Image: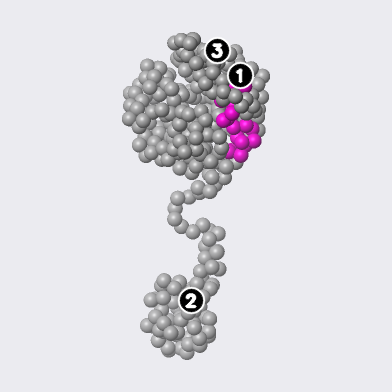
Amino acid sequence: MKRVVEIGGRVVGPGRPVLMVAEATINHNGDLDLARRMIAAAARAGADAVKFQAYHTEEFLASRELTYTYVSQGREVTESQFDMFKRCELGRPEFEALRDECRRQGVLFLCTATDMDAARMLVEIGAPAIKVGSDDLVHHPMLRELARARVPLILSTGMADLAEVRRTIGVLREAGGDEVVLLHCTSLYPTPEDRANVRCVETLRREIECPVGYSDHTFGISAAAGAVALGACLVERHFTLDRNLPGPDHPFSADPATLEALVRAVRTIEQNLGSAAVEPTPEELAMRAIARRSVVARGAVPAGTVLTKAHVAYKRPGTGVFPMDEHLLLGRRVRRDLREGDVIALGDVE
């Protein structure tokens, strides 16, 4: 697997700026105008990409009797999964319009594919990568085809254990798919803070040789920000224009203000992470001279005196011999008369 992956001209991987993805999911409620407004709002909030979901409801639902229960507009709703997904289903013309709107707004157009027809359509209209949701991590027949298509994949790991992730990565590798970004994910909607388990980002980075990111379903921004501190190179956050809109994902999605706060937090953390080298910054070198102590004369010390502990003190500035190196001075004769408080340099002794 490649250590870095290029998505639409953006390099994703360790040491690169985090790719911030606003996950529109089905929060457009099947309304193309609402989807366009979401793209514009995500771009203003600082997102690098906006992601949608391409699916054919009949392809992945075996029964119209399956239901889903969620909280919307403050009340519990139970409805047919088929009806819920069908009313939000978009076709190729809509995705082409959303692709064009993303270009106008200066963000990447990304999309989840739930079947190969959707994946082929996305490749044809120029999607720079294809997202595979957690539910399809074990859909190896589709993943093999996607790998052969030689398109970068973003793969969520919700509901999976490490053995399943390894097995899936092996399948992709064998099929020739070597451009994969793994996203740690907890498939709970919303995800309680104590189930975010962002340490899994470290585990996946250590165990799997590919870029690792985080798909966030929590209410706040701390989990995603923490994931970046642990090395996540892509953050995907559910996004809505208004948490009070009807639908299953709106209540826990980030509104524009929350998304903007998350982007700011991530960019600040990127600056905070800085270098891993344990060494003073250039500015600290100047501070060191001000704040550290040097070995100084405790009182007047005539030339020719053999320095002992009784002759020295430890005071600012830190421009001379540090206290930890006083052994370089003690037991040696001073070459010049020292006044009280004089910094004792190596050249002052013989």
Residue drawn at the location 48% of the way across and 11% of the way down: 65
Q: Residues within 10 Å of mark 2 (few under 14, many from 20)?
A: some
Q: Residues within 10 Å of mark 1 (few under 14, many from 20)?
A: many
Q: Quadrant of residue 26?
A: top right
Residue under label 3: 83
Report the Cα–Cα distance between label 1 and label 2: 70 Å
In this rendering, the answer to whether 242 lies above or below 258 is: above
Residue under label 2: 314
Q: Quadrant of residue 105?
A: top right
- Among the two numbered marks 3 and 1 on one chain, the one whose residue lies closer to the N terminus: 1
Report the Cα–Cα distance between label 3 and label 1: 12 Å
Amino acid marked by disc 3: Asp
Secondary structure of the residue carrying numbered label 1: loop
Q: How many marks?
A: 3
Residue drawn at the location 54% of the way across and 23% of the way down: 70
Q: Is residue 97 left or right of residue 161?
A: right
User: Is residue 291 on the magenta stretch?
Assistant: no
Percent coordinates x, y for residue 301 in the rendering? 48, 87
Residue under label 1: 29
Secondary structure of the residue carrying numbered label 3: helix
Q: Quadrant of the N terminus?
A: top left
Amino acid marked by disc 2: Tyr
Q: Is residue 225 left or right of residue 73?
A: left
Q: Nearer the viewer, residue 191 or 156?
A: 191
